[in-house]
Image: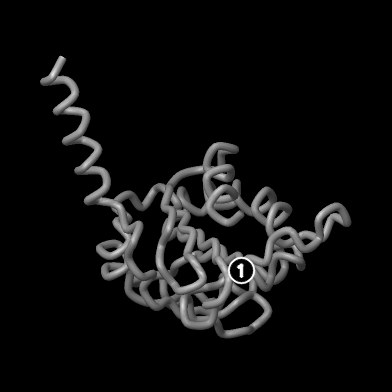
């Protein structure tokens, strides 16, 4: 019994050591579909910020599962509790390496295919990926990574993969 408990405790510590929670979100500069330049976290301080990052087609597919529920939860004005959340929301397709040159063409295509109310919330990044992978502990390019950044720029929650109610509940619980 002690051995099992010790193993579970060790695994929990290893998971915490691999998490970016508690660190400052690294500076990430991009341009929204509607042409506004944003740098996270400097331009987002003072509000909680939900950031979703992807840098492959597989990850982008799963990141899109977050679009509607996150937008509906944090941005859309439904009339019920319009001011319940004052949160920044950014979905960030990351164009890196040889793909960085494709960012402008992708942005043009997104202007035509992404619903207009999401344009201010899709932030296109073109540049290197390695420092983000290391700092944010992003080790699987097939998954999107979702972060909740507090009002001072610190990561208070991190997850990966497609949207689930449990993940949204965890984010929601930290914001309230």
Query: Could one spot residue 102 in this view of the protein?
Result: no
Q: Choose between 144 and 102: the one closer to the eye.
A: 144
Task: Give residue 154's position: percent from left, percent from top.
Answer: 40, 67
Disc 1 is placed on an element classified as strand
- In the rendered image of this protein, does residue 4 appear above or below residue 108? above
Residue density around tag 1, few if under 14, some if 14–19, many if 20 or more, within 10 Å: some
Task: Give residue 47's position: percent from left, percent from top.
Answer: 58, 71
Question: Quadrant of the rendered structure where residue 105 is?
Answer: bottom right
Task: Give residue 1's position: percent from left, percent from top.
Answer: 16, 14
Query: Could one spot residue 107 in this view of the protein?
Result: yes
- In the rendered image of this protein, does residue 171 appear above or below residue 91? above
- In the rendered image of this protein, does residue 145 appear above or below residue 114? above
Question: Quadrant of the rendered structure where residue 168 is?
Answer: top right
Which residue is pictured at 48% across the width and 76% down the height? 40
Which residue is pictured at 45% across the width and 67% down the height? 94
Considering the image in quadrants, where does the C terminus appear?
Answer: bottom right
Which residue is pictured at 28% across the width and 65% down the height? 135
Answer left or right for 13 relative to 101: left
Q: Residue furthest top?
A: 1
Q: How was the colour assigned to the protein in this rendering? A: one colour
Residue pointed to by mark 1: 88
Answer left or right for 123 relative to 149: right
Q: Choose between 76 and 7: the one closer to the eye.
A: 7
Answer left or right for 114 relative to 81: left
Q: Choose between 61 and 174: the one closer to the eye.
A: 174
Answer left or right for 108 relative to 59: right
Task: Give residue 21's position: percent from left, percent from top.
Answer: 35, 57
């Amino acid at each position: 019994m002690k051995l099992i408990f010790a193993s579970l405790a060790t695994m929990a510590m290893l998971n915490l050591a691999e998490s970016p929670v508690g660190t400052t979100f690294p500076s990430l500069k991009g341009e929204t579909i509607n042409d506004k330049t944003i740098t996270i976290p400097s331009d987002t301080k003072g509000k909680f910020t939900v950031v979703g990052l992807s840098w492959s087609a597989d990850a982008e597919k799963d990141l899109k599962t977050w679009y509607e529920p996150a937008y509906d939860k944090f941005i859309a004005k439904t009339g019920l509790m319009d001011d319940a959340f004052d949160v920044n929301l950014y979905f960030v397709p990351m164009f890196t390496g040889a793909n960085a040159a494709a960012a402008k063409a992708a942005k043009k295509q997104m202007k035509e295919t992404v619903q207009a109310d999401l344009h201010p919330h899709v932030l296109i990044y073109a540049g290197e990926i390695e420092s983000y992978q290391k700092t944010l502990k992003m080790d699987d390019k097939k998954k999107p990574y979702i972060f909740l950044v507090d009002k001072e720029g610190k990561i208070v929650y991190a997850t990966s993969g497609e949207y689930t109610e449990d993940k949204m509940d965890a984010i929601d619980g930290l914001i309230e």
